[in-house]
Amino acid sequence: MANYSENLLNELIKRDVSVKVVTSHCACKYKYRGSPTLFGGKYCLVNAPFDSYADKPDRSRIQSLFYRASRIPLGSLYAKQCRDSDILHYQQSSIYSFGELPLLTLLTQSKAPCKVVTIHNLYIDRLYGRGNPLRLLPRVYQYTDAVIVHSKRQKDRLMQVGIPEDKIHVVFIGSQKVNLRGLARTRVAFFGSPEEFKGFFSLLKALRILRDEGIKVNLEVYGIYGKEDEEKTKNEARRNNVEDQVKWYGSLSEREFDEKMQESIFTFAIPTEPVWGSSIITRAMMNGTPVIATPLGGSSEYLGDAGVYVSPNDPASLASAVRDLLENRRLREDLGKMVRQRALQYLSWEAIAEKTIQIYQSVLNT
């Protein structure tokens, strides 16, 4: 989310849009490790109770409960900072500082300006389960002027749960243009938190299948994750007898991310349920890295014919895809060229900013 916001902000400023960034203590600071401030200092920091917990991805369950509850009033604090603006553009992600709970209080602020919400993550099937109070969230969107999603499939899914079609706009996730440096592709890497719903447990089972066939694939894991998640995943790796094949690394700077991506033979975007935007896919595409993906949440809209698709929760199919790519260098090179071309054609931040400005103008004119 921080990556999306920073790149969109920079492009909006180039078009003489005056932007004020309102943020809080959240996981975004991990992305900016080594930087003196978030967004180059162009932001207003909103404080809330238990902000110190935001520094701990491995919070206890009790701490996590208090932390989530403390996010509810953040929406009012965000809205207060934006009353002098023409547009309040909320970047909705996960369940924490910019999740659904702050959104509930933000959207009902009558003194707030026109409200635009970009949904980066909203796991509808997870949220709208039986007895879940957040099943009423679509009704809250009646207070928005526009909702931005990252694929047509996501738009269709939101319409199914009652959000009006005329409020929903599809804008791809952009990707910063990078130069290919001709690095040797020797890694197999997973980028992101190694969670079960992101398909990581299926990947471990696929590694076991390949190992039983005599193919030992070493996997590198890069992302933001806590000790609890790491231990849970390491236990799963041990159960599959592949713990010696997985190397654990932390978060990456922007330069490191592109470097590791360009050194990857291929990478994975294999969630078991729809996700509302994958910067892993867009970054892989811009870096010319083939992607093995599950066709959920719009990944096929981004990758087109350049993706290698497997069914969710299908380790055998995933193992077969890994084997095919490892054995066919020509296929990998062709796919890399194809995803790179699609990225340059569809995912420039200039195009993303232009579409976003058009949405701003449409809500201001209504």
Image: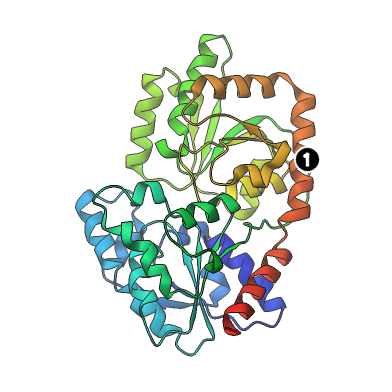
Residue flagged by tag 1: what amino acid is it?
Met
Circle 1 crowding by C-alpha within 10 Å: few under 14, some 14–19, many from 20:
many
> Residue 235, position in %: x, y?
34, 27
Image height of 39 relative to 317, above or below: below
Q: Nearer the viewer, residue 150 or 80?
A: 150
Q: Which residue lies at the image location 62% right of the left edge and 24% below the top edge?
A: 321
> Residue 106, position in %: x, y?
37, 75
Q: Nearer the viewer, residue 346 or 365?
A: 365
Residue at the left extreme?
Answer: 62
- Is 25 left, or right, of 189 in this rendering? left
Q: Which residue is mark 1?
A: 338
Label 1's element? helix
Image height of 101 relative to 288, above or below: below
> Residue 311, position in %: x, y?
53, 29
- Is 311 left, or right, of 45 in this rendering? right
Which coloring applies here?
rainbow
Image height of 118 relative to 88, above or below: above
Q: Which residue lies at the image location 67% right of the left edge and 20% below the top edge?
A: 324
Q: Which residue lies at the image location 62% right of the left edge and 32% below the top edge?
A: 309
Q: How many marks?
A: 1
Q: Is residue 24 visible?
A: no
Residue at the top extreme?
Answer: 213
Q: Which residue lies at the image location 51% right of the left edge and 76% below the top edge?
A: 21
